[in-house]
């Protein structure tokens, strides 16, 4: 009995040490995973200060972000304005751009696999990408030049960044579709994207119809009571900017 009691006592003395070691290991592992996740997320954050050399620019372009992070682009000509806009859009939210162009053309299966085949059938029935393709030959030269400059800006960003450095979502998508790589941006994608967004933003058409009907019998102020306007205390884009030192893109066409 004495020997049995001694063995039990020895076992109990080891248990707290094992538990302590396990908890420390889990804590260190948790901190490591949090640090890794933070690193992956931050490496896709947009550059908000300094200078970026963007081949193709004809003159210097300045980008200033206000206190909400919204970029304001100042350029000497339209080409540079749209090219910088394409670069900034890709820098800030390329995942959304990529996802929505696949929505517009009914190609979600390329990103997420066969589970989206039925969705793609519906989206192709809507025909946004098909109509956009038909519109390209009818675009005037000036507008086409703007769209090409914008696409060049997006593609300049894609040439520098891919995978998780492009956007955090691609790090997650890699587990589902490891071979996926975003294709270059085209004029077609911009036109398709616009149609998808028009559809998405037009889903309040029912309330707009209701407002129009009510305005036949009520005054505008009475209708505003039923459909309150945007609150004045919420954020808006203001003319004044909080300037940051060296916050912008600079470069010329001959820059490396």
Image: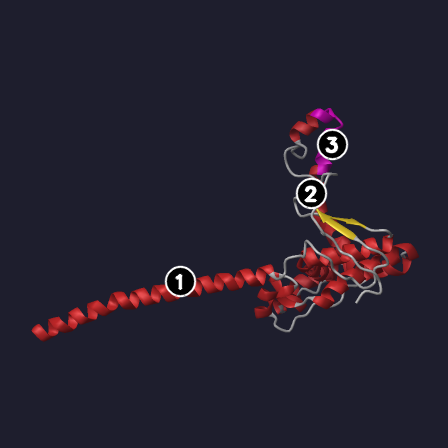
| Number of other residues with Cα within 10 Å of mark 1, as a class: few under 14, some 14 to 19, many 20 or more | few
| Residue 213, label in figure | 3
Disc 3 and disc 2: Cα gap in Å? 43 Å
Q: Position of residue 73 (x, y in %)?
A: 77, 49
Q: Position of residue 229 (x, y in %)?
A: 68, 33
Secondary structure of the residue carrying tag 1 is helix
Residue position for label 2: 242
Residue position for label 1: 27
From the viewer's perspective, is 223 left or right of 173? right
User: Does any portion of residue 100 appear in the rendered image?
Assistant: no
Q: Which picture quadrant has residue 54?
A: bottom right
Which is more N-terminal, label 2 or label 1? 1
User: In this picture, which residue range is highlighted in magenta?
Assistant: 208-221
Asked if labels 3 and 1 touch by Cβ distance under 8 angstroms, the answer is: no
Q: Position of residue 238 (x, y in %)?
A: 72, 38
Residue under the image location 73 percent in, 63 percent down = 157
Residue under the image location 54 percent in, 60 percent down = 38
Q: Which picture quadrant has residue 111?
A: bottom right
């Amino acid at each position: 009995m004495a020997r049995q009691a001694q063995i039990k006592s020895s076992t109990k003395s080891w248990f707290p040490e094992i538990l302590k070691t396990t908890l420390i290991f889990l804590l260190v592992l948790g901190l490591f995973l949090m640090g890794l996740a933070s690193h992956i997320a931050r490496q896709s954050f947009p550059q908000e200060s300094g200078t970026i050399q963007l081949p193709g620019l004809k003159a210097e372009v300045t980008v200033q972000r206000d206190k909400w992070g919204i970029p304001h682009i100042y350029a000497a000509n339209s080409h540079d304005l749209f090219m910088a806009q394409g670069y900034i859009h890709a820098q800030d939210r390329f995942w959304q751009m990529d996802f929505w162009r696949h929505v517009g053309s009914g190609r979600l299966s390329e990103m997420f696999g066969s589970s989206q085949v039925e969705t793609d059938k519906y989206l192709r029935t809507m025909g946004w990408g098909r109509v956009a393709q038909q519109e390209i030959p009818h675009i005037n030269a000036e507008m086409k030049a703007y769209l090409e400059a914008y696409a060049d800006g997006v593609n300049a960003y894609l040439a520098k960044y891919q995978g998780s450095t492009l956007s955090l979502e691609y790090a997650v998508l890699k587990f589902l579709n490891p071979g996926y790589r975003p294709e270059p941006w085209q004029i077609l994608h911009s036109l398709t994207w616009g149609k998808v967004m028009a559809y998405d933003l037009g889903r309040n058409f029912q309330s707009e119809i209701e407002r129009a009907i009510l305005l036949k019998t009520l005054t505008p102020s009475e209708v505003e009571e039923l459909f309150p306007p945007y609150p004045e205390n919420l954020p808006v884009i203001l003319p004044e900017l909080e300037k940051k030192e060296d916050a912008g893109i600079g470069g010329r066409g001959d820059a490396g």
